[in-house]
Amino acid sequence: MDKKKFIFVLSHSTEKPIEVIGLMKIALNMKAFDDSVALDFFLIGGGVQLAKKGIAESISMEMEGQKIVVADMLNTLIDDFKVKFYVCHAFMPAFGISKDDLIRNTEVKASSFLGELLLEGYQPFQLNI
């Protein structure tokens, strides 16, 4: 059986925290159920802000009576599950982000890299909440 491969495409960050939290919750659950699944994030548009140091700490919301902080979820994805965050370089200048600003476990890539992943069999996953 082929290995399951998913690329979570995130085009929002600070302006739509529910999408960030929703995608990260799904990713965390998938990895918790099956750590062998290949699962990474591709940050494009406003989503590139998530890769900037300090931004994830500023994104939170209350869900089910508790405060959810994106930084906590991000750290679990990176530290426990070794999830990579690919950052579309074309959008970095629009948000004042340089390579020195990036969190750990990120790679700067062209948007064509997303196409490469899709051709390799990665299934795209995106929320529009």
Image (spheres, helix red, strand yellow):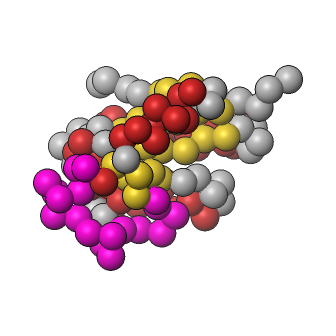
Q: Is residue 21 visible?
A: no
Residue 45: x %, y % from top left: 24, 42
Task: Please identify the quadrant where the C terminus is shown.
Answer: top left
Q: Can you name the residue that lies furthest to the bottom here?
A: 100
Against 98, is 118 above or below? Answer: above
In the rendering, at what x and y percent does residue 8 appear? 48, 36
Q: How many marks?
A: 0
Quadrant of res 114: top left
Q: Position of residue 11 (x, y in %)?
A: 29, 38
At x 30% / y 54%, what residue is drawn?
A: 89
Q: Nearer the viewer, residue 10 or 14?
A: 10
Q: Nearer the viewer, residue 119 or 9?
A: 119
Q: Nearer the viewer, residue 38 or 110?
A: 110
Q: Is residue 104 left or right of residue 17?
A: right
In the image: residue 114, left or right of residue 48: right
Picture residue at 57% right of the left edge, 27% below the top = 119
Q: Is residue 104 magenta?
A: yes
Magenta residues, as a range? Answer: 90-107
- Quarter of the figure that contains the N terminus: top right
Identify which residue is drawn at 41% across, 68% down.
103
Q: Find residue 39 and report its horizontal and vertical position in percent.
A: 60, 41
Is residue 75 in sight in this rendering? yes
Picture quarter containing residue 58? bottom left
Q: Residue furthest right?
A: 1
Residue 129 drawn above or below residue 60 = above
**Image position of 39 (left or right of 48):** right
Please tell me whether residue 64 is drawn above or below residue 56 in the rendered image.
above
Q: Between residues 18 and 115, which one lies in front from this camera angle?
A: 115
- Residue at image point 48% right, 69% down: 104
Q: Is residue 119 magenta?
A: no
Q: Is residue 100 above or below residue 36?
A: below
